[in-house]
Amino acid sequence: MYGNDFIDPDEPLNAAEFGDVDDAVAAAATTAAQRAEGGSSFEALLAADQRIEPRDEMPEAYRKTLIRQIAQHAHSEIIGMQPEGNWISRAPSLRRKAILMAKVQDEAGHGLYLYAAAETLGVDRAELLDLLHSGKQKYSSIFNYPTLTWADNGAIGWLVDGAAIMNQVPLCRCSYGPYARAMIRVCKEESFHQRQGFEILWTLSRGTAAQKDMAQDAANRWWWPALMMFGPPDTGDAATTGGHTAQSMAWGIKRFSNDDLRQKFVDMTVPQAAKLGLTLPDPDLRFNEETGHWDFGAIDWSELWRVLKGDGACNAERIERRVGAHHEGAWVREAANAYAARHDLGQQQEYVA
Amino acid sequence: MSTPAVKGNSSERSWPLWEVFVRGKRGLSHVHVGSLHAPDAEMALRNGRDVYTRRQEGVSLWVVRSMDITASSPDERDSFFDPAADKIYRHPTFYDIPEDVEYL
């Protein structure tokens, strides 16, 4: 009516309206005090729950731990494209095919965010890929299990991505800035992954008897490996990981123990399984009135170590496929380089003329 | 920051690193979202679109070669930003104003 370009007054337009200015004022008041205590050293930043950024000073062991963890995480994302990629051509409908392609594309994207985060620590992505291809760096052993039926795509989304989210949400507050920022992007996207998996099983579980059996079989095979994704026990008498968790927690890389996250995952998932009308393959699974948590049976850790050391169903196949894809893509990289070089040359000649 | 590992033949060398900035919607500034490798600017834009805007997160993209960015050094952070540190009177909340004054 007044010719104004009217926008939602509640919507922040720029940094000033996000409250950043107020934060800056508050920060200005505290910075002086912090500085007096030598406040921007690595330890002081950690103590204040501040983020460490790429060019800050950091202990060599912190840097190395992060490179190893972020690289392993990145490797897991791109190897994780394979189990579901295996089903793209056989997805039961166009809708499922489009969804699966989007999901596998997301995994590639997650790998790229993470490799980029690792590179801020002074390694090169090519180096990290070499380490993956030569078996010197690992990826999550969950991806060494095969996807035998369509229902496995549902179980992966529901259980494997569900467990991954449980692990990744606390990493959004990781002390290393670029890793935390990458994890925020990943977590935002991961939510669709879990929901589409649940939807696959939800559909199957209300289908024919054969479809329901297929869903149950997938849940049976993926349940225990999903619990192993949180890593070996690191609390109480069963702890096997030595001081690793403690050190990562002191550095603000890890926020919760493996066991805490695993318990949260079980508590979250058991009611979801009931909703699906599926059982979980654990006779010891029962609700503990006293603790308010679901108790679960003993995990066969020998299986994790066996699969980790190379004896899973698909270890060799996954790496072979990855190395193969890398070699098959060589001509594309070469062509892009040739094009870029010629373009550069053309520009130089223009300057000369 | 990152040390390019030049290995093998030229086709296997690492592509240069680019920093990616996305304008979320009209009216907002471009914001840094991350980095990527690409052989040239055109590919950096395409890769940037595929990596950082798969869910319509942007209406405009900038890509800048990382090596073209000059950054202030964290070592001199304190002295570099010191001039502003003791001038909190530049912020509106510094001032004592009676609470019942409107539009101020």
Image: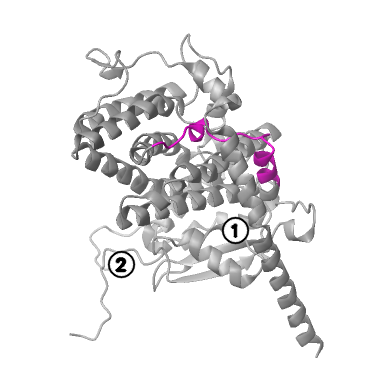
Share a chain, discs 1 and 2? yes
The quarter in which the C terminus of chain A is drawn is bottom right
Q: Residue at x 78, y 54 (%)?
A: B6
* Subunit under mark 1: B
Magenta span includes A231: no
Q: Is residue B92 above or below residue A322?
A: below
Q: Position of residue A248 (x, y in %)?
A: 56, 28
The residue carrying mark 1 is B36
Q: Is residue B103 above or below residue A206?
A: below
Q: Circle 1 sits in a helix, a strand or a loop, which is it?
A: strand
What is the number of the mark on residue B104? 2
Front-lying residue, A269 or A24? A269
In magenta, the rendered stretch is A127-148
Q: Amino acid at mark 1?
A: Leu
Q: Position of residue A224 (x, y in %)?
A: 40, 24
How far, Cα to Cα, is label 1 from label 2?
A: 46 Å
Q: Quadrant of residue A242?
A: top right
* Subunit under mark 2: B
Q: Amino acid at mark 2?
A: Leu
Q: Residue at x 66, y 41 (%)?
A: A133
Q: Quadrant of residue A44?
A: top right
